[in-house]
Amino acid sequence: MEEFKNDMLTEKDPRYMAVKEVVHHLIECNKDIPGISEINWIIHVVDSPDINAFVLPNGQVFIFTGLLNSVTDIHQLSFLLGHEIAHAVLEHAFIFDRPYSRTLEAEADKIGLQLAAKACVDVRASSVFWQQMEFAESLHGLPKLPQWLSTHPSHGNRAEHLDRLIPQALKIRETCNCPPLSGPDPRLLFKLSMKNFLEEAKKEDLNITVKPKMDTLPIQNEKQIPLTCIVE
């Protein structure tokens, strides 16, 4: 898109290469799904602080560096990119009917979680991202819009929806002969991290409306997604 032309990262940029690797891994592990192999996927990474990503019906994926800076591990990024791939595969049109748009987002979350599961992603990290977003907004003191005024589900509702879908996604992950998940559940780590953060803030009488540094948030120990998978 022309408005982003001057802000695109080059293909040699490490951030671009990381996104490309994740997208190609997701596509390879889901090539049995109708539509995925037929689409000519083109990746664009936009150097912008916006926490955003979107996909065009022709398979052009746009992800902003603001979103890359907001994820704490490769698993969260994989789920978010799976969500965008799901929009294209489901042939979602970009419309402005708010209730239907929220329905589309929920559907893309469900399918995106399944795509990530088949790629051996730790799908439990998906709901943690939205909990982080909700926590960061509350620290900023930003007013929360009622869900019916938004084109997207609230962060909290999105996390709850994903938590209900995660057990099924974990079963899909097992059927793909993925390596067992190691370490504690990232959702538990996040809750403990936030509890400690708030306790320390209270002790030191800090102004917790200031956004926490990303290094205060839990990061998965796994360095990368295993770049192997078995599809049906």
Image (tube, rainbow, N blue to C red):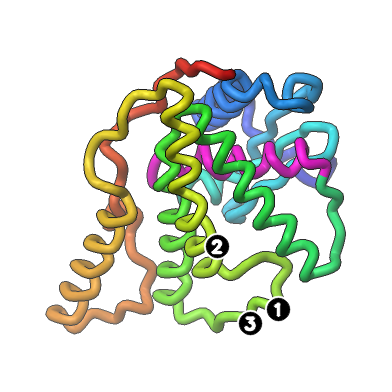
| x 33%, y 64%: residue | 212
Look at label 1 and name its amino acid: Trp
Q: Quadrant of the C terminus?
A: top right
Q: CA distance from mark 3 to mark 2?
A: 14 Å
Q: For the magenta stretch, what is the residue range?
A: 72-91
Viewer-nearest of discs 3 and 2? 2
Q: Quadrant of the N terminus?
A: top right
Q: In x, y percent, where is residue 109?
A: 61, 50
Look at label 3 and name its amino acid: Pro
Is residue 21 shown above or below 214? Answer: above
Is residue 197 shown above or below 30? Answer: below
Q: In x, y percent, where is residue 209?
A: 37, 78
* Neighbours of disc 1 within 10 Å: few (<14), some (14-19), many (20+): few
Q: Which mark is residue 148?
A: 1
Outermost residue on the left side: it is 203
Q: In x, y percent, where is residue 79?
A: 53, 42
Residue where numbered disc 2 is placed: 158
Instruction: For mark 1, give the secondary structure.
Output: helix
Give yes or no for contact between labels 3 and 1 (Cβ–Cβ under 8 Å).
yes
Is residue 164 shown above or below 136? Answer: above
142, 86: nearer the viewer: 86
Q: Which mark is residue 231?
A: none
Asked whether residue 88 is drawn in magenta, I would say: yes
Q: Which mark is residue 146?
A: 3
Look at label 2 and name its amino acid: Arg
Determine if residue 74 is in view.
no
Q: CA distance from mark 3 to mark 1?
A: 5 Å
Determine if residue 37 is in view.
yes
